[in-house]
Image (spheres, helix red, strand yellow):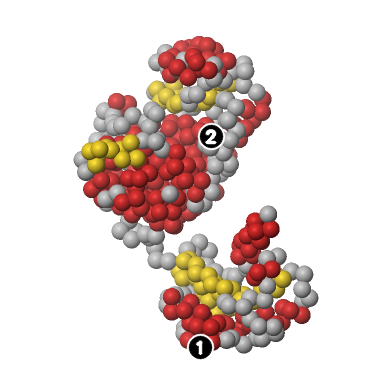
Amino acid sequence: MKKLLALVASLLLVASFATPAQSAGAKYKVYQKTLATFSSTATTLTGQQKAQVKAAVEANPDAEKFICTGIRYFSQPMSVNIMVRKRAKAACEYAKQLNPELSTWYQNKPTQARSYAGKVLLTVKTEKAEPTFDSFDPEDISSLAFSSVQAKLASISKDQALSYTLIAGPSVSDSAKVRENARLQNSLLFWSSVYSEPFAAYLYTGDDVDWLIGELEARGNPFWNDLVRNHYWRSTGNCSQSSAAVIPGNHHFIHCQRSTSGSLRESNIFAHELAHLPIASFAGNQPLGIFSTFPVWMNEGGAQFFSIVLTNEANDDDSAYWHKLHLSSSRDKITLSTRPEGVNFKDLLADITVAETVELMTVLESQSALDNNTPYAMGLWATELLVAIKGIDTYFEFLQGLDSNTDWEAALEETYGFDKGDLYGYLTKYLHWIWKTYK
């Protein structure tokens, strides 16, 4: 427990440091190094400490900010601030001596982690170049995509939010209705900028299956009967299906309520199904109308991405939980021309080649997403990449570019300036990073 508390305290220390004002929205690469321990009341740098400062300067030749923070244990007298501040000043002055172009800043901060007391933390910030599909830092993709969606969300008037009809089965609790309605609020606002079709959302439990089928048939939807009365429901009495239907003039979706519906893992499903409505609506604008083909990875992965970043319980700016979940929970066995014996999805990503990514994504354009995680995972990461590099408005331009004369491949090339093969190739570097980071 002591080790855990120390770790938490050290994390809080780093997270709480204030830095000089910086331009809004700037993206930085951050390098941090704690200097070796000072002896007693010393305020000058030892040879070892100078070597550490020099290494930090040389490792960051284009640094924009070089911040030196003297650290005082929170219960020590304020007079200790003077000592640790002098240490921080000495470190920054030496860094400035090594590189006169550096912008340095020294300060002092308290900590509850004893192991940091009396030390100096160097924080070096280097502004990153604007990312491109040819050159991007994979660790930035999730946060860039997240920020783009959140900025769009903040720009839309709350009066513009979509209205919808929530229809709950007799066995659905009031708390479930409140919870699921809350999970849609950001989506209702976000999608209102490109989608305006009235729609209904049904919540049901395993006890409401007959009721739901009656409701769906009344809407002219008899083709979900087997979906709702599936084998799992017959053997357990518990529902399991959530799905969306985009019938002209009759958009609706269903969402099963079960004991795990309140969990983080399932927090985004309601918003996922809602996302299918606008995405599928645009897909239906292609030359063959509602019978037009649209990549399964783009449909399911797109809905997955937007449901994560638009559901308050689910979203986080690096999507770490979801990357790890998609990587570790997949049991899909992938067969490619280069791997005819088949390989586990997770293992494939370790060294997947550009050609293999292109082959896999091409397969996922039409592969069923039923009982298959791969279209969700690969589609999530491909959608993130599109939104991260070019922004959400460009993604909307792509969707809005689908019309009776333009299919998704032509719209992709017209909007982004490259074809689907190029996109699949760009994705490879991100897949390697996902595997390396979350394996």
Q: Nearer the viewer, residue 171 or 437?
A: 437
In-front residue for pair 127/116: 116
Q: Is mark 2 on a helix, strand or loop?
A: loop
In percent of width and height, residue 390 lies at 38, 53
Disc 1: CA contacts within 10 A as few (<14), some (14-19) or many (>=20) = few
Task: Report if residue 350 is visible in the image.
Answer: yes
Residue found 35% across the figure and 53% down from its top? 432
SS of the residue under disc 1: helix
Direction from residue 375 to residue 50 in the image, left or right = right
Residue drawn at point x = 47 percent, y = 31 percent = 273
Numbered tag placed on residue 266 in the rendering: 2
Q: Residue 238, how many percent across, how many down?
A: 54, 20
Q: Which amino acid does label 2 sit on?
A: Glu
In this rendering, position of residue 327 left or right of residue 120 = left
Which is nearer the N-term, disc 1 or disc 2?
Answer: 1
Q: Is residue 180 above or below residue 235?
A: below
Q: Which residue is drawn at 40% across and 41% down?
A: 377
Q: Which amino acid does label 1 sit on?
A: Gln
Residue 97, label in figure: 1
